[in-house]
Image: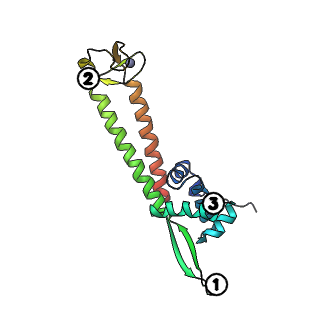
Amino acid sequence: MPLVRKKLFVNRPVVQDFLKKVGGEAAVGVTTLCEKKGRCVTDEELAKKMKLKVTEIRTVLNRLHYRGIACYKKTKNKKSGWYNYTWEIKKKRVLELILEQQQEMIEKLEVKKSFGEQYSFFNCKNDCEITPFEIAAEYQFRCPTCGETMTSFDYRKRLEDINRRIGELKEEVGALRKLA
Ligand SMILES: [Zn+2]
């Protein structure tokens, strides 16, 4: 019978990008291992599996802990008297944070979009900066950066890009909501 591979949420590019940003390169590996195990894992176990130093794993876990993504349980080893730390990754928290971030990005793009729909813009041939009409007029349509003449800038292409990006983000948000 063929093995049915469960689709790991950590395989989604948006999740990987987010984890790397928050916890560094090794954060994806740490999360993957925790998700595959489906239980709490010790930092030593993670270090062994990932062939990294325990201190490196702890740095990643501490970063993730700071954002509420990783949490630990402390238990005393009766034999050695040392403490063991077992870690767990809160998938729900990861999704929550990504959704927050995506929502913020959508809002920023919506602002850009309405800005682009309301104003007319100018730019120079060197493409220094897209400038609203009033500001370009103040500079007498001379680019403040390079001194070239600024001419009317067609914002439609830019709006198309913005709309497409908003669409992509909304789709991603929808897909992530289903996982949460
Ligand atoms: Zn210029």
Identify which residue is drawn at 33% across, 35% down: 112
Q: Which mark is residue 135?
A: 2
Left or right: 74 as drawn, with respect to 133: right
Residue 70: % across, % down: 51, 65
Left or right: 53 as drawn, with respect to 146: right
Q: Is mark 3 within 8 Å of ligand 1?
A: no
Residue 58: % across, % down: 57, 64
Residue 52, placed above or below residue 146: below
Q: Amino acid at mark 2?
A: Ile
Task: Say what secondary structure mark 1 lies in.
Answer: loop
Residue 170: % across, % down: 43, 45
Say if residue 74 shows up in the picture. Answer: yes
Neighbor class of circle 3 (other Cα within 10 Å; few <14, some 14-19, many 20+) is few
Q: Which mark is residue 6?
A: 3
Q: Amino acid at mark 1?
A: Ser
User: Quadrant holding ligand 1?
Assistant: top left
Where is mark 1, residue-wise? 80
Disc on the earlier residue, 3 or 1: 3
Which quadrant holds the N terminus?
bottom right
How many numbered marks have been drawn onto this rendered protein structure? 3
Disc on the earlier residue, 2 or 1: 1
Q: Determine the image quadrant of residue 54.
A: bottom right
Q: Name the residue at the bottom extreme.
A: 78
Task: Say what secondary structure mark 3 lies in.
Answer: loop
Q: CA distance from mark 2 to mark 3?
A: 55 Å
